[in-house]
Image (cartoon, grey):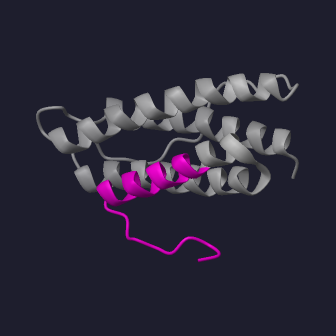
């Protein structure tokens, strides 16, 4: 996979993450589940910022940024069940973390450092959403 292909794949993953995190966040009660609500709000902001950075990186690499899809498959969640909402958000972070892993493998220099930081951030967010620690590949 070329660096530009990895950027485009990661950008597509961020588009999907924003759609799903936005949906899950809209199902979360700020008063009923304040920790989850705050985590989702932070997640949305982070994914939006990363998406914007990826758009710039794709352009710098000579590509036309992939557009967001018109719609994405949404997880089956129950707004009254914090565990269901957390699990959906956790799945998003796991998918993004894996996608950024491919970007790490394709990038060099400061772009690689940026991608590593994104992987680490996703891993920390996974823990906050109830995920379990796991070893990174190659360690």
Residue 83: x and y in percent read 27, 56
Up the image or down, 28 lies above or below 121; here it is above
Residue at the far front: name it.
109
Q: Is residue 137 magenta?
A: yes
Range of magenta residues: 116-139
Q: Residue at x 69, y 36 (%)?
A: 12
Tell me the quadrant of the picture where the C terminus can be found.
bottom right
User: Residue 46 lies in what quarter of the image?
Assistant: top left
Q: Please indicate, yes or no, whether residue 9 appears anywhere in the rendered image.
A: yes
**57 w.r.t. 114: above or below:** above
- Residue 65 visible in the picture: no
Q: Position of residue 7 (x, y in %)?
A: 75, 39
**Percent of width and height locating residue 82:** 24, 50
| 60 sits to left or right of 116 | right
Pick whichever, 70 or 68, lies toward us.
Answer: 68
Q: Residue drawn at (60%, 29%), measured in percent from left and top?
A: 51
Q: How many marks?
A: 0
> Front-most of 96 and 109?
109
Q: Is residue 105 left or right of residue 22?
A: right
Relative depth, front residue between 111 and 67? 111
At which x and y percent is residue 65? Answer: 77, 24
State the residue at coordinates (47%, 47%): 75
**Is 47 inside the magenta-drawn segment?**
no
């Amino acid at each position: 996979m070329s660096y530009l292909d990895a950027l485009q794949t990661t950008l597509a993953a961020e588009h999907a993450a924003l759609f799903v995190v936005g949906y899950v966040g809209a199902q979360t009660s700020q008063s009923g589940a304040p920790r989850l609500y705050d985590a989702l709000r932070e997640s949305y902001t982070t994914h939006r910022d990363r998406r914007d950075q990826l758009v710039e990186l794709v352009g710098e690499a000579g590509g036309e940024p992939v557009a967001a899809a018109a719609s994405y498959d949404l997880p089956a969640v129950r707004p009254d069940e914090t565990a269901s909402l957390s699990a959906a958000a956790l799945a998003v972070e796991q998918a993004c973390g894996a996608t950024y892993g491919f970007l790490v493998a394709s990038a060099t220099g400061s772009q690689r450092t940026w991608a590593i930081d994104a992987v680490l951030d996703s891993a920390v967010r996974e823990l906050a959403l109830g995920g379990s620690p796991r070893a990174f590949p190659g360690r």
